[in-house]
Amino acid sequence: MRLIRAACAALASLTIAVSASAQQSAANDTSSLGKIRVSLAGEIESEGGAHPNLQDDLEYVALIARQSGTLLRILQQYEEERSDKQVGATSSASGTTTLVSKGTVPKVLGLAVENGAATRTVNGTTVTFRSDLGGAIRALAGKGFFQLTPGADPSLSLLRRLSASASFDTSRGQTETLTADQQQLSQWTARLQVIDQRDPYGPSAAARWRDRLVSIQTGIPEAAIKLFATFDTDPVVKMWLQATQDAVTAAKVAASAKSVTERAIDIATTLRDRESSFPTADQLRPETVLALDQYERTTSTFVRERHDMLQALATGALVSLEYTNDRPLKAPRTSNVRLVGEVGGTVDLTGNASVTFFDQNPAGVSSSVRDVQFSGQMDIKMGSADTVGAFVLSFAGRYSRQLENSFNDDGVMLPNTKGTTAVGQLKLTVPVKGSGVRIPLSVTFANRTELITESVVRANVGLTYDLDVLFAKFHP
Protein backbone atom coordinates (compact mmCIF):
# COMPACT_ATOMS: atom_id res chain seq x y z
CA MET A 1 0.00 0.00 0.00
CA ARG A 2 2.82 2.40 0.88
CA LEU A 3 4.46 1.49 -2.42
CA ILE A 4 1.36 2.41 -4.40
CA ARG A 5 0.83 5.52 -2.30
CA ALA A 6 4.40 6.65 -2.80
CA ALA A 7 4.15 6.05 -6.54
CA CYS A 8 0.97 8.12 -6.73
CA ALA A 9 2.61 10.84 -4.69
CA ALA A 10 5.73 10.86 -6.80
CA LEU A 11 3.56 10.98 -9.92
CA ALA A 12 2.04 14.13 -8.53
CA SER A 13 5.54 15.54 -8.01
CA LEU A 14 6.44 14.80 -11.62
CA THR A 15 3.20 16.26 -12.90
CA ILE A 16 3.90 19.44 -10.96
CA ALA A 17 7.46 19.52 -12.23
CA VAL A 18 6.65 18.99 -15.93
CA SER A 19 5.49 22.58 -16.43
CA ALA A 20 6.76 25.81 -14.94
CA SER A 21 3.24 26.96 -14.17
CA ALA A 22 2.55 23.82 -12.19
CA GLN A 23 5.78 24.32 -10.26
CA GLN A 24 4.71 27.85 -9.41
CA SER A 25 1.33 26.54 -8.29
CA ALA A 26 3.01 24.03 -5.98
CA ALA A 27 5.05 26.79 -4.40
CA ASN A 28 1.98 28.90 -3.66
CA ASP A 29 0.72 28.37 -0.12
CA THR A 30 -3.05 28.22 -0.64
CA SER A 31 -5.22 27.53 2.37
CA SER A 32 -5.93 23.93 1.31
CA LEU A 33 -2.32 23.13 0.44
CA GLY A 34 -1.03 24.81 3.58
CA LYS A 35 -3.30 22.65 5.74
CA ILE A 36 -2.17 19.47 3.95
CA ARG A 37 1.51 20.37 4.27
CA VAL A 38 1.16 21.20 7.97
CA SER A 39 -0.59 17.85 8.49
CA LEU A 40 2.34 15.97 6.92
CA ALA A 41 4.83 18.07 8.88
CA GLY A 42 3.03 17.11 12.07
CA GLU A 43 3.40 13.43 11.16
CA ILE A 44 7.12 13.83 10.47
CA GLU A 45 7.59 15.77 13.72
CA SER A 46 5.95 13.01 15.74
CA GLU A 47 7.99 10.18 14.19
CA GLY A 48 10.85 8.78 16.25
CA GLY A 49 14.40 9.48 15.15
CA ALA A 50 15.76 12.39 13.20
CA HIS A 51 15.71 10.90 9.68
CA PRO A 52 12.27 10.70 8.03
CA ASN A 53 12.02 8.45 4.96
CA LEU A 54 10.30 10.75 2.43
CA GLN A 55 10.66 8.21 -0.38
CA ASP A 56 7.91 6.13 1.19
CA ASP A 57 5.76 9.01 2.36
CA LEU A 58 5.06 11.71 -0.24
CA GLU A 59 1.31 11.85 0.34
CA TYR A 60 1.14 15.61 0.58
CA VAL A 61 2.36 15.99 -3.01
CA ALA A 62 -0.35 13.63 -4.20
CA LEU A 63 -2.91 15.79 -2.45
CA ILE A 64 -1.48 18.86 -4.18
CA ALA A 65 -2.33 17.24 -7.52
CA ARG A 66 -5.90 16.74 -6.40
CA GLN A 67 -6.39 20.48 -6.62
CA SER A 68 -6.00 20.28 -10.40
CA GLY A 69 -8.52 17.63 -11.28
CA THR A 70 -8.72 14.40 -9.28
CA LEU A 71 -11.74 13.10 -7.39
CA LEU A 72 -11.44 15.28 -4.29
CA ARG A 73 -11.38 18.50 -6.31
CA ILE A 74 -14.26 17.31 -8.49
CA LEU A 75 -16.36 16.42 -5.45
CA GLN A 76 -15.63 19.79 -3.85
CA GLN A 77 -16.72 21.58 -7.01
CA TYR A 78 -19.79 19.35 -7.23
CA GLU A 79 -20.86 20.44 -3.74
CA GLU A 80 -20.28 24.13 -4.47
CA GLU A 81 -22.34 24.03 -7.68
CA ARG A 82 -25.35 22.17 -6.26
CA SER A 83 -28.62 24.08 -6.52
CA ASP A 84 -30.89 21.36 -5.11
CA LYS A 85 -30.60 22.19 -1.38
CA GLN A 86 -33.31 23.81 0.71
CA VAL A 87 -31.44 26.05 3.16
CA GLY A 88 -33.93 28.77 4.12
CA ALA A 89 -37.48 28.79 5.47
CA THR A 90 -40.52 27.59 3.52
CA SER A 91 -42.84 29.93 1.65
CA SER A 92 -45.23 30.38 4.59
CA ALA A 93 -42.63 32.07 6.81
CA SER A 94 -42.85 35.78 7.53
CA GLY A 95 -39.39 36.27 6.04
CA THR A 96 -38.39 34.04 3.11
CA THR A 97 -37.08 34.06 -0.44
CA THR A 98 -38.50 30.58 -1.12
CA LEU A 99 -41.62 29.90 -3.12
CA VAL A 100 -40.85 26.25 -3.91
CA SER A 101 -39.05 23.90 -1.49
CA LYS A 102 -36.03 22.14 -2.99
CA GLY A 103 -35.30 18.41 -3.07
CA THR A 104 -32.60 17.96 -0.42
CA VAL A 105 -30.87 19.77 2.47
CA PRO A 106 -27.28 20.41 3.68
CA LYS A 107 -25.55 17.39 5.23
CA VAL A 108 -23.93 19.34 8.04
CA LEU A 109 -25.61 22.71 8.64
CA GLY A 110 -27.40 25.40 6.68
CA LEU A 111 -28.07 28.93 7.93
CA ALA A 112 -30.32 31.49 6.23
CA VAL A 113 -31.25 35.07 7.04
CA GLU A 114 -34.15 36.21 4.84
CA ASN A 115 -36.28 39.33 4.67
CA GLY A 116 -39.59 39.91 2.90
CA ALA A 117 -42.54 37.52 2.88
CA ALA A 118 -43.30 35.63 -0.32
CA THR A 119 -47.06 35.17 0.08
CA ARG A 120 -48.05 36.92 3.31
CA THR A 121 -48.97 40.57 3.81
CA VAL A 122 -46.68 41.28 6.78
CA ASN A 123 -42.96 41.14 6.04
CA GLY A 124 -40.41 39.91 8.53
CA THR A 125 -36.82 38.81 9.00
CA THR A 126 -36.39 35.09 9.61
CA VAL A 127 -33.24 33.20 10.66
CA THR A 128 -33.33 29.50 9.75
CA PHE A 129 -31.05 26.68 10.90
CA ARG A 130 -31.28 23.43 8.92
CA SER A 131 -29.34 20.16 9.17
CA ASP A 132 -29.25 16.50 8.16
CA LEU A 133 -29.34 14.55 11.43
CA GLY A 134 -27.04 11.70 10.39
CA GLY A 135 -24.50 14.04 8.80
CA ALA A 136 -24.48 16.36 11.81
CA ILE A 137 -23.84 13.46 14.21
CA ARG A 138 -20.90 12.16 12.18
CA ALA A 139 -19.50 15.67 11.76
CA LEU A 140 -19.58 16.16 15.53
CA ALA A 141 -17.75 12.83 15.82
CA GLY A 142 -14.88 14.33 13.82
CA LYS A 143 -15.58 12.72 10.45
CA GLY A 144 -14.56 14.49 7.24
CA PHE A 145 -17.23 15.64 4.79
CA PHE A 146 -16.83 12.64 2.47
CA GLN A 147 -16.93 10.32 5.49
CA LEU A 148 -20.42 11.46 6.52
CA THR A 149 -22.07 8.44 4.90
CA PRO A 150 -23.54 6.00 7.44
CA GLY A 151 -21.62 2.87 6.47
CA ALA A 152 -23.04 -0.31 7.99
CA ASP A 153 -24.68 1.40 11.00
CA PRO A 154 -28.47 0.87 10.57
CA SER A 155 -29.37 3.73 12.92
CA LEU A 156 -27.28 6.19 10.91
CA SER A 157 -28.77 4.77 7.71
CA LEU A 158 -32.14 5.99 8.97
CA LEU A 159 -30.85 9.27 10.39
CA ARG A 160 -29.18 10.21 7.09
CA ARG A 161 -32.68 10.35 5.61
CA LEU A 162 -33.99 12.66 8.33
CA SER A 163 -33.42 16.40 8.60
CA ALA A 164 -34.91 19.22 10.60
CA SER A 165 -34.98 23.01 10.66
CA ALA A 166 -35.99 25.78 13.02
CA SER A 167 -36.91 29.32 11.93
CA PHE A 168 -36.92 32.32 14.24
CA ASP A 169 -38.76 35.60 13.56
CA THR A 170 -36.48 38.35 14.89
CA SER A 171 -39.36 40.89 14.93
CA ARG A 172 -40.82 39.06 17.93
CA GLY A 173 -39.12 40.92 20.71
CA GLN A 174 -38.33 44.42 21.86
CA THR A 175 -34.85 44.64 20.32
CA GLU A 176 -35.56 42.78 17.03
CA THR A 177 -32.40 40.71 17.49
CA LEU A 178 -32.06 36.94 17.40
CA THR A 179 -32.65 35.37 20.80
CA ALA A 180 -33.72 31.95 19.40
CA ASP A 181 -36.22 31.48 22.23
CA GLN A 182 -39.68 29.93 22.15
CA GLN A 183 -41.33 33.27 21.47
CA GLN A 184 -39.27 33.81 18.31
CA LEU A 185 -39.73 30.24 17.03
CA SER A 186 -42.04 30.88 14.09
CA GLN A 187 -41.65 27.63 12.16
CA TRP A 188 -40.04 24.21 12.43
CA THR A 189 -39.82 21.44 9.88
CA ALA A 190 -39.02 17.74 9.74
CA ARG A 191 -38.11 16.07 6.46
CA LEU A 192 -37.77 12.48 5.27
CA GLN A 193 -35.58 11.94 2.20
CA VAL A 194 -37.39 9.21 0.26
CA ILE A 195 -35.15 9.16 -2.84
CA ASP A 196 -31.72 10.75 -3.23
CA GLN A 197 -29.92 9.85 -6.45
CA ARG A 198 -27.53 12.80 -6.20
CA ASP A 199 -25.49 11.77 -3.18
CA PRO A 200 -22.09 10.73 -4.63
CA TYR A 201 -21.63 8.30 -1.72
CA GLY A 202 -25.22 7.18 -1.36
CA PRO A 203 -26.41 3.56 -1.82
CA SER A 204 -27.65 4.12 -5.38
CA ALA A 205 -24.29 5.56 -6.42
CA ALA A 206 -22.21 2.76 -4.87
CA ALA A 207 -23.12 0.20 -7.53
CA ARG A 208 -22.38 2.68 -10.28
CA TRP A 209 -18.95 3.47 -8.83
CA ARG A 210 -18.24 -0.27 -8.68
CA ASP A 211 -19.56 -1.21 -12.14
CA ARG A 212 -17.98 1.65 -14.05
CA LEU A 213 -14.70 2.23 -12.23
CA VAL A 214 -13.40 -1.09 -10.90
CA SER A 215 -12.34 -2.35 -14.32
CA ILE A 216 -10.41 0.86 -14.98
CA GLN A 217 -8.75 0.69 -11.57
CA THR A 218 -7.15 -2.70 -12.29
CA GLY A 219 -4.46 -1.11 -14.46
CA ILE A 220 -3.45 1.53 -11.95
CA PRO A 221 -1.42 -0.62 -9.47
CA GLU A 222 0.75 -2.09 -12.23
CA ALA A 223 1.47 1.36 -13.68
CA ALA A 224 2.13 2.75 -10.20
CA ILE A 225 4.63 0.00 -9.32
CA LYS A 226 6.43 0.50 -12.62
CA LEU A 227 6.63 4.24 -12.02
CA PHE A 228 7.94 3.73 -8.50
CA ALA A 229 10.62 1.36 -9.82
CA THR A 230 11.86 4.00 -12.27
CA PHE A 231 12.19 6.49 -9.41
CA ASP A 232 14.49 4.06 -7.65
CA THR A 233 16.84 4.02 -10.65
CA ASP A 234 16.57 7.67 -11.74
CA PRO A 235 19.53 9.53 -10.20
CA VAL A 236 17.96 13.02 -10.33
CA VAL A 237 14.84 11.83 -8.55
CA LYS A 238 16.92 10.07 -5.90
CA MET A 239 19.05 13.19 -5.50
CA TRP A 240 15.95 15.35 -4.99
CA LEU A 241 14.48 12.92 -2.48
CA GLN A 242 17.77 12.73 -0.56
CA ALA A 243 18.24 16.51 -0.58
CA THR A 244 14.68 17.08 0.59
CA GLN A 245 15.06 14.45 3.28
CA ASP A 246 18.32 16.06 4.45
CA ALA A 247 16.66 19.49 4.52
CA VAL A 248 13.74 18.18 6.57
CA THR A 249 16.12 16.37 8.92
CA ALA A 250 18.14 19.55 9.42
CA ALA A 251 14.99 21.54 10.10
CA LYS A 252 13.82 18.93 12.57
CA VAL A 253 17.15 18.93 14.44
CA ALA A 254 17.44 22.71 14.41
CA ALA A 255 13.98 23.04 15.91
CA SER A 256 14.47 20.37 18.58
CA ALA A 257 14.36 22.93 21.38
CA LYS A 258 11.14 24.49 20.13
CA SER A 259 7.55 23.54 20.87
CA VAL A 260 5.78 20.79 18.92
CA THR A 261 3.78 23.36 16.96
CA GLU A 262 6.87 25.39 16.08
CA ARG A 263 8.77 22.29 14.96
CA ALA A 264 5.92 21.27 12.65
CA ILE A 265 5.79 24.79 11.17
CA ASP A 266 9.54 24.73 10.43
CA ILE A 267 9.22 21.32 8.72
CA ALA A 268 6.25 22.53 6.66
CA THR A 269 8.23 25.59 5.57
CA THR A 270 11.11 23.36 4.47
CA LEU A 271 8.79 21.12 2.46
CA ARG A 272 7.24 24.14 0.77
CA ASP A 273 10.66 25.53 -0.16
CA ARG A 274 11.74 22.19 -1.69
CA GLU A 275 8.61 21.60 -3.82
CA SER A 276 9.59 23.90 -6.67
CA SER A 277 13.01 22.26 -7.11
CA PHE A 278 11.70 18.86 -8.24
CA PRO A 279 13.50 17.91 -11.49
CA THR A 280 11.88 18.96 -14.75
CA ALA A 281 10.94 16.57 -17.56
CA ASP A 282 14.14 17.20 -19.54
CA GLN A 283 16.22 16.27 -16.48
CA LEU A 284 14.48 12.92 -15.96
CA ARG A 285 15.49 9.64 -17.59
CA PRO A 286 13.40 8.70 -20.67
CA GLU A 287 12.21 5.58 -18.81
CA THR A 288 10.86 7.76 -16.01
CA VAL A 289 9.01 10.02 -18.44
CA LEU A 290 7.60 6.96 -20.26
CA ALA A 291 6.42 5.41 -16.98
CA LEU A 292 4.88 8.73 -16.06
CA ASP A 293 3.03 8.91 -19.39
CA GLN A 294 1.68 5.39 -18.94
CA TYR A 295 0.49 6.13 -15.43
CA GLU A 296 -1.08 9.42 -16.54
CA ARG A 297 -3.02 7.66 -19.30
CA THR A 298 -4.34 5.08 -16.85
CA THR A 299 -5.26 7.54 -14.14
CA SER A 300 -6.64 10.23 -16.47
CA THR A 301 -9.17 7.74 -17.84
CA PHE A 302 -10.13 6.88 -14.30
CA VAL A 303 -10.48 10.54 -13.28
CA ARG A 304 -12.43 11.41 -16.44
CA GLU A 305 -14.86 8.54 -15.81
CA ARG A 306 -15.39 9.72 -12.23
CA HIS A 307 -16.10 13.22 -13.50
CA ASP A 308 -18.64 11.90 -16.01
CA MET A 309 -20.30 9.91 -13.23
CA LEU A 310 -20.70 13.01 -11.09
CA GLN A 311 -22.22 14.81 -14.05
CA ALA A 312 -24.70 11.94 -14.36
CA LEU A 313 -25.42 12.07 -10.61
CA ALA A 314 -26.34 15.74 -10.96
CA THR A 315 -29.33 14.70 -13.09
CA GLY A 316 -30.64 12.17 -10.55
CA ALA A 317 -34.07 12.32 -8.95
CA LEU A 318 -34.83 13.68 -5.48
CA VAL A 319 -38.03 12.95 -3.58
CA SER A 320 -38.75 14.03 -0.01
CA LEU A 321 -41.68 14.35 2.36
CA GLU A 322 -41.68 17.44 4.57
CA TYR A 323 -43.75 18.45 7.58
CA THR A 324 -43.90 22.14 8.55
CA ASN A 325 -45.44 23.55 11.71
CA ASP A 326 -46.18 27.29 11.53
CA ARG A 327 -46.44 29.02 14.89
CA PRO A 328 -47.83 32.57 14.68
CA LEU A 329 -48.06 34.45 17.98
CA LYS A 330 -51.85 34.86 18.10
CA ALA A 331 -53.29 33.38 14.91
CA PRO A 332 -54.14 29.63 14.77
CA ARG A 333 -51.19 27.30 14.34
CA THR A 334 -51.11 25.16 11.21
CA SER A 335 -49.39 22.01 9.95
CA ASN A 336 -48.34 21.55 6.33
CA VAL A 337 -47.46 18.24 4.68
CA ARG A 338 -45.49 18.70 1.47
CA LEU A 339 -44.28 16.27 -1.19
CA VAL A 340 -41.15 17.54 -2.98
CA GLY A 341 -39.75 16.12 -6.21
CA GLU A 342 -36.81 17.27 -8.33
CA VAL A 343 -35.11 16.14 -11.55
CA GLY A 344 -32.75 17.74 -14.03
CA GLY A 345 -29.13 18.79 -14.29
CA THR A 346 -28.02 22.04 -15.89
CA VAL A 347 -31.71 22.88 -15.84
CA ASP A 348 -33.43 21.62 -12.68
CA LEU A 349 -37.18 21.11 -12.43
CA THR A 350 -38.76 21.03 -8.95
CA GLY A 351 -42.38 20.37 -8.02
CA ASN A 352 -44.28 20.64 -4.72
CA ALA A 353 -47.74 19.46 -3.69
CA SER A 354 -49.00 20.18 -0.20
CA VAL A 355 -51.99 20.44 2.10
CA THR A 356 -52.29 22.63 5.22
CA PHE A 357 -54.34 21.76 8.33
CA PHE A 358 -55.32 23.72 11.42
CA ASP A 359 -53.71 22.17 14.50
CA GLN A 360 -56.96 22.97 16.33
CA ASN A 361 -60.04 24.19 14.50
CA PRO A 362 -60.64 27.82 15.50
CA ALA A 363 -64.13 29.22 15.90
CA GLY A 364 -65.79 30.05 12.62
CA VAL A 365 -64.14 27.45 10.37
CA SER A 366 -66.00 24.49 8.92
CA SER A 367 -63.07 22.22 8.04
CA SER A 368 -59.66 21.38 9.44
CA VAL A 369 -58.16 21.68 5.94
CA ARG A 370 -56.99 25.24 5.42
CA ASP A 371 -55.58 25.07 1.87
CA VAL A 372 -54.07 22.93 -0.88
CA GLN A 373 -51.08 24.08 -2.92
CA PHE A 374 -49.24 23.11 -6.10
CA SER A 375 -46.00 24.78 -7.18
CA GLY A 376 -43.13 24.37 -9.62
CA GLN A 377 -39.73 25.88 -10.25
CA MET A 378 -37.14 25.84 -13.05
CA ASP A 379 -33.52 26.53 -12.10
CA ILE A 380 -30.97 27.41 -14.79
CA LYS A 381 -27.37 27.02 -13.66
CA MET A 382 -24.89 29.58 -14.96
CA GLY A 383 -21.15 29.85 -14.41
CA SER A 384 -18.87 27.44 -12.61
CA ALA A 385 -17.17 27.10 -9.23
CA ASP A 386 -13.86 27.20 -11.16
CA THR A 387 -14.60 30.62 -12.67
CA VAL A 388 -16.93 33.36 -11.42
CA GLY A 389 -19.05 31.04 -9.27
CA ALA A 390 -22.21 28.99 -9.72
CA PHE A 391 -25.08 31.44 -10.32
CA VAL A 392 -28.66 30.16 -10.50
CA LEU A 393 -31.55 31.88 -12.32
CA SER A 394 -34.96 30.59 -11.16
CA PHE A 395 -38.52 30.91 -12.42
CA ALA A 396 -41.22 29.70 -10.03
CA GLY A 397 -44.99 29.63 -9.77
CA ARG A 398 -47.51 28.52 -7.18
CA TYR A 399 -51.26 27.87 -7.17
CA SER A 400 -53.03 27.85 -3.81
CA ARG A 401 -56.69 27.12 -3.12
CA GLN A 402 -57.60 28.52 0.31
CA LEU A 403 -60.65 26.74 1.72
CA GLU A 404 -61.03 28.78 4.92
CA ASN A 405 -60.77 32.47 5.77
CA SER A 406 -57.46 33.90 6.92
CA PHE A 407 -56.54 35.15 10.38
CA ASN A 408 -54.47 38.28 10.90
CA ASP A 409 -51.54 38.51 13.32
CA ASP A 410 -53.91 39.41 16.18
CA GLY A 411 -55.85 36.17 15.65
CA VAL A 412 -58.93 37.87 14.16
CA MET A 413 -60.68 36.08 11.27
CA LEU A 414 -60.93 38.19 8.11
CA PRO A 415 -64.13 37.52 6.16
CA ASN A 416 -64.17 36.89 2.40
CA THR A 417 -60.48 35.91 2.24
CA LYS A 418 -61.10 32.41 0.90
CA GLY A 419 -60.16 31.87 -2.71
CA THR A 420 -57.38 31.23 -5.18
CA THR A 421 -53.90 32.70 -4.99
CA ALA A 422 -51.54 32.64 -7.97
CA VAL A 423 -47.93 33.61 -7.36
CA GLY A 424 -44.96 33.98 -9.68
CA GLN A 425 -41.35 34.55 -8.77
CA LEU A 426 -38.13 35.50 -10.54
CA LYS A 427 -34.98 34.84 -8.50
CA LEU A 428 -31.25 35.17 -9.02
CA THR A 429 -28.99 33.39 -6.55
CA VAL A 430 -25.57 35.03 -6.38
CA PRO A 431 -22.70 32.94 -4.96
CA VAL A 432 -19.74 34.20 -2.96
CA LYS A 433 -17.21 31.89 -4.59
CA GLY A 434 -15.66 29.19 -2.42
CA SER A 435 -17.41 30.28 0.78
CA GLY A 436 -20.73 28.43 0.85
CA VAL A 437 -22.47 31.83 1.01
CA ARG A 438 -25.22 32.67 -1.46
CA ILE A 439 -27.37 35.77 -1.82
CA PRO A 440 -30.87 35.07 -3.21
CA LEU A 441 -32.52 38.12 -4.80
CA SER A 442 -36.14 37.65 -5.86
CA VAL A 443 -39.19 39.51 -7.07
CA THR A 444 -42.61 37.99 -6.34
CA PHE A 445 -45.85 38.73 -8.19
CA ALA A 446 -49.24 37.68 -6.80
CA ASN A 447 -52.90 38.29 -7.62
CA ARG A 448 -53.51 38.61 -3.85
CA THR A 449 -52.06 37.75 -0.46
CA GLU A 450 -53.53 35.67 2.32
CA LEU A 451 -54.96 38.77 4.00
CA ILE A 452 -55.65 41.23 1.17
CA THR A 453 -57.48 40.35 -2.05
CA GLU A 454 -55.44 42.76 -4.18
CA SER A 455 -52.49 42.18 -6.50
CA VAL A 456 -49.02 42.77 -5.10
CA VAL A 457 -45.41 42.97 -6.27
CA ARG A 458 -42.75 42.36 -3.64
CA ALA A 459 -38.94 42.15 -3.51
CA ASN A 460 -37.13 39.66 -1.29
CA VAL A 461 -33.51 39.36 -0.27
CA GLY A 462 -31.62 36.85 1.82
CA LEU A 463 -28.26 35.45 2.84
CA THR A 464 -27.81 31.67 3.00
CA TYR A 465 -24.81 29.77 4.28
CA ASP A 466 -24.20 26.13 3.36
CA LEU A 467 -21.53 24.73 5.69
CA ASP A 468 -21.20 21.67 3.41
CA VAL A 469 -19.09 23.68 0.95
CA LEU A 470 -16.49 24.73 3.52
CA PHE A 471 -16.56 21.36 5.25
CA ALA A 472 -15.84 19.60 1.94
CA LYS A 473 -13.04 22.08 1.21
CA PHE A 474 -11.21 22.23 4.54
CA HIS A 475 -12.16 18.94 6.22
CA PRO A 476 -12.83 16.50 3.37
Image (cartoon, rainbow, N blue to C red):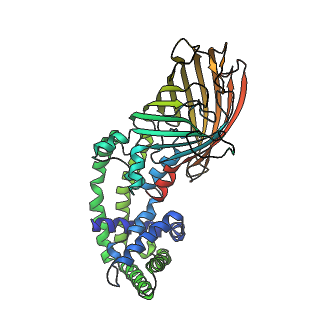
Tell me, yes or no, if residue 71 can be seen here: no
Q: In the rendered view, does 375 fall on the left or right side of 291?
A: right
- Residue 46 lies, in percent from the top left, at 36, 77
Kindly identify the residue that appears in the image at 34 percent across and 75 percent down: 55
- Residue 406 lies, in percent from the top left, at 63, 19
Kindly identify the residue that appears in the image at 28 percent across and 68 percent down: 3
Question: Where, by quadrant of the figure, is residue 371 drawn?
Answer: top right
Instruction: Please state, as top left, top right, bottom left or bottom right, where the N terminus lies in the image.
Output: bottom left
**Picture layout, residue 197 above or below residue 242:** above
* Foreground of the two, 311 or 155: 155
Q: In the rendered view, does 404 fall on the left or right side of 133?
A: right
- Residue 47 lies, in percent from the top left, at 33, 78
* Foreground of the two, 256 or 123: 123
Question: Where, by quadrant of the figure, is residue 242 drawn?
Answer: bottom left
* Foreground of the two, 171 or 54: 171
- Residue 206 lies, in percent from the top left, at 32, 43
Tell me, yes or no, if residue 321 can be seen here: yes
Instruction: Please state, as top left, top right, bottom left or bottom right, where the C terminus lies in the image.
Output: bottom left
